[in-house]
Amino acid sequence: MKRTTPAAVAVSPLTQAFDAMRFGSARTLDLRTSMPTAEQAVQRLDPWMRQKQVEKAGDVLVITGRGNGSPGGVAVVRVAVRKALTQLKRKRVVADVQEHTPGSYVVTLEQTAALFEAGKRTRDSECAPSVRLTEVRGLELQTVTLLRTLSARALDALGAPRSERFMTDEFQRQFSVLSAAIPADAPDREVRLREIIAAALEAYDDAE
């Protein structure tokens, strides 16, 4: 009699039903159905994870499949996704990753505040990260206003003065850190930037 390995066991309908109830379509990224390449899977994973962090989704489900149809039985998509999740953990997007089934992961996202913690300056910090002036000048008025508001809140939290020099440095710092969380080729990049800024402001409100 052939022995059944854990990787060969199909996900039960009961597990699927519980997953659908727990995560729903909004908090599930199904990479198995479309059968992407490893590179395509990672390209879809990164912006989706960052968006779910901004949405404060908490736990999300990433379905990779077990790789049974891959050459040599090597789950290339699963391996690539696991590596990408580890990188996102270092970037403060992902807090924890747990294997849910042999073909899926449950991912706990970092708090939204983690997006801009790296952008907080100290009173002794004088050098703001370099940003291209063309990027800043191309921002819409609504985005600039939100960034200035966030910069003021960050300076207040540090007890730093709202002088023009400090505001300019903090503006550049926040823009550099937060815009880095959005793929450069995202078509709605500035809209997503405003969402992140709004989430950062909410985090300051929650901390008060």
Image (cartoon, rainbow, N blue to C red):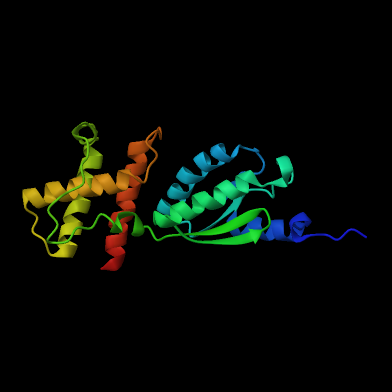
Q: Residue at x 55, y 37 (%)?
A: 40
Task: Compare residues 150 and 67 and report the one nearer the observer.
Answer: 67
Task: Compare residues 118 and 143 and report the one nearer the observer.
Answer: 118
Q: Classify the position of the C terminus by image quarter.
A: bottom left
Disc tally is 0
| Residue 50 locus on image (x, y percent) | 43, 49
Q: Classify the position of the N terminus by image quarter.
A: bottom right
Q: Residue at x 76, y 56 (%)?
A: 13
Furthest residue in direction bottom, as rendered: 208
Furthest residue in direction right, as rendered: 1
| Residue 182 locus on image (x, y percent) | 37, 42
Is residue 26 shown to the viewer in this render? Answer: no
Q: Residue at x 39, y 61 (%)?
A: 111
Left or right: 160 as drawn, with respect to 32: left
| Residue 144 locus on image (x, y percent) | 21, 41
Is residue 116 shown to the viewer in this render? Answer: yes
Q: Residue at x 50, y 53 (%)?
A: 85
Task: Compare residues 74 and 7 and report the one nearer the observer.
Answer: 74
Left or right: 66 as drawn, with respect to 93: right
Task: Specify the quadrant of the image occupied by residue 38.
Answer: top right
| Residue 165 locus on image (x, y percent) | 7, 49
Task: Specify the quadrant of the image occupied by residue 124.
Answer: bottom left
Left or right: 128 as drawn, with respect to 191: left
